[in-house]
């Protein structure tokens, strides 16, 4: 027999909105779909969904505006990321990957820290141990006590994200 609390946790887990922010900017002259970084992030998203976090999305999963002129396409994607961080996500997961351009996810993390501080307790950062985050960024992360998980290999990413998301889910349940 499923207990009332267990059922409650499963319902919340199915409905909590997890936004994965990571590096998947298309490489010059290549299509977005050919980006191996995007493929890795989609695997993480799919793993989270399979484990019960059904509302896990990348920003790229949400529809774009139709007819955005090329002259403002970068502004469009920046505004789109910021919108989903600010207005949609319950949990923000910032993933830094090896061999990928992490500048976009760095910008998204800075936006969270500077403009959406109420989401800091519901955020986590996953990064390879050898990637050096800037001293200022590390100072912000430590000072604001953002969850941080360094990893050795890509196989650890899914477990770190799942565990962090569960910790944040329980914090949200306690705050309700």
Image (cartoon, grey):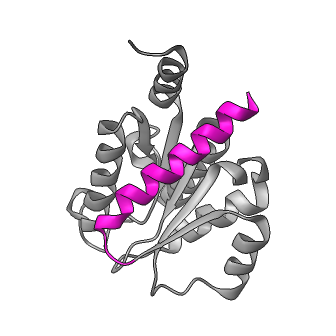
At which x and y percent is residue 41?
Answer: 34, 57
Which residue corresponds to the image point at 60% horizontal and 36% vertical from the top-left?
Answer: 88
Q: Quadrant of the C terminus?
A: top right
Kindly tell me whether residue 63 is visible in this rendering. no
Quadrant for the N terminus in the image: top left
At which x and y percent is residue 146? 68, 63
Image quarter for residue 75?
A: bottom right
- Name the residue rendered at 71%, 54% in the picture: 120
Residue 119 in view here: yes
Specify the farthest residue to the left: 34
Q: Position of residue 20 (x, y in %)?
A: 47, 51
Left or right of 52? Residue 163 is right
In the displayed structure, 175 sits above or below 21; it is: above
Q: Which residue lies most toward the front here?
A: 1
Task: Determine whether 79 is above or below 11 in the image.
Answer: below
State the predominant SS element of the stretch in magenta.
helix
Q: Which residue: 73% across, 62% down?
A: 113
Depth order, front residue of 168/101:
168
Q: Nearer the viewer, residue 49 or 112?
A: 49
Provide residue 25's location: percent of width, then percent of height.
Answer: 39, 65
Give, as a single range, the part of the protein colored magenta.
152-176
**Residue at the image position 57 percent from the left and 47 percent from the top:** 167
In depth, the one of 23 and 40 nearer the eye is: 40
Left or right of 94 on screen, residue 55:
left
User: Is 31 contained in the magenta span?
Assistant: no
How many labels were placed on the picture? Answer: 0
The vertical placement of 173 against 133, above or below, is above
Left or right: 87, with 55 as reference point: right
Residue 172 part of the magenta segment: yes
């Amino acid at each position: 027999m499923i207990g009332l609390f267990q059922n409650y946790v499963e319902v919340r887990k199915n409905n909590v909105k997890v936004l994965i922010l990571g590096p998947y900017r298309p490489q010059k002259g290549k299509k977005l779909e050919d980006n191996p970084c995007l493929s890795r992030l989609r695997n993480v998203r799919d793993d989270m969904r399979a484990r019960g976090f059904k509302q896990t999305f990348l920003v790229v999963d949400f529809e774009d505006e139709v007819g955005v002129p090329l002259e403002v396409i970068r502004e469009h994607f920046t505004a789109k990321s910021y919108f989903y961080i600010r207005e949609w996500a319950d949990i923000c997961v910032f993933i830094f990957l090896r061999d990928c351009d992490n500048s976009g996810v760095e910008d998204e993390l800075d936006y969270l820290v500077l403009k959406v501080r109420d989401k800091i307790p519901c955020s986590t950062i996953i990064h390879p141990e050898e990637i050096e985050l800037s001293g200022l960024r590390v100072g912000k992360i430590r000072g604001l006590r953002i969850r941080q998980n360094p990893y050795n290999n890509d196989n650890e990413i899914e477990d770190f994200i799942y565990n962090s998301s569960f910790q944040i889910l329980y914090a949200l349940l306690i705050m309700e």
